[in-house]
Amino acid sequence: MTHDIEWPVQQQLEAYNARDIEAFMAWWAEDCQYYAFPSTLLASGAAEIRARHVERFMEPDLHGKLLTRIVVDNLVVDHETVTRNFPEGKGEVDVVCIYEVEAGKIAKAWFKMGERRMLP
């Protein structure tokens, strides 16, 4: 059961790192909700999530490194370090990602961002 819940989250992370928008979106429910933790809605529905990521996937250094994963019931909680190309340069940020999985797709997700660290 844990594998079934974890699978869509792992697959979307791999697609994120490949910057493959089609493979990434395959794991999100059509009516998914995407939040800044705890409750700021950033995107509602697959089309809005796609729009947010098309631009992000243009970043040449984009990469999410999974540090820890916890699965409880239908929730997957990832702790990642994400490398980004910020306007001020290349950097990284720690992120806690909480995914609610329903019927093999990500139905809701919450993201808590840490402080940006600029890289040399």
Image (spheres, rainbow, N blue to C red):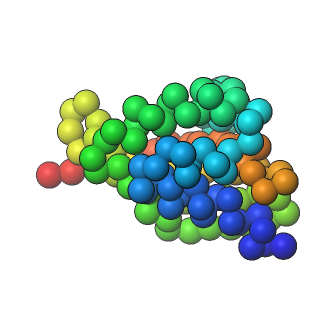
Residue under the image location 50 percent in, 55 percent down: 15
Check the image and name the residue furthest to the front: 22
Q: Where in the figure is residue 36, as x and y percent of width and height? A: 60, 34
Query: Can residue 28 be seen in this snapshot?
Result: yes
Residue under the image location 42 percent in, 56 percent down: 18
Q: For this view, does 95 lie left or right of residue 103?
A: left
Number of numbered discs on residues: 0
> Relative to the observer, which residue lies in front, 49 or 70?
49
Check the image and report above or below for 34 versus 107.
above
Q: Where in the figure is residue 97, as x and y percent of width and height? A: 60, 51
Q: For this view, does 91 lie left or right of residue 46?
A: left
> Relative to the observer, which residue lies in front, 73 or 32?
32
Q: Where in the figure is residue 19, as x and y percent of width and height? A: 42, 49
Q: For this view, does 37 lie left or right of residue 59?
A: right
Residue under the image location 74 percent in, 73 percent down: 3
Q: For this view, does 97 lie left or right of residue 61?
A: right
Query: Can residue 94 be seen in this snapshot?
Result: no
Q: Where in the figure is residue 93, as x and y percent of width and height? A: 39, 48
Residue under the image location 20 percent in, 39 percent down: 89
**Quarter of the image containing the N terminus?**
bottom right
Instruction: Identify the image quadrant of residue 41.
Output: top right
Check the image and report above or below for 71 versus 98.
below
> Relative to the observer, which residue lies in front, 27 or 120?
27
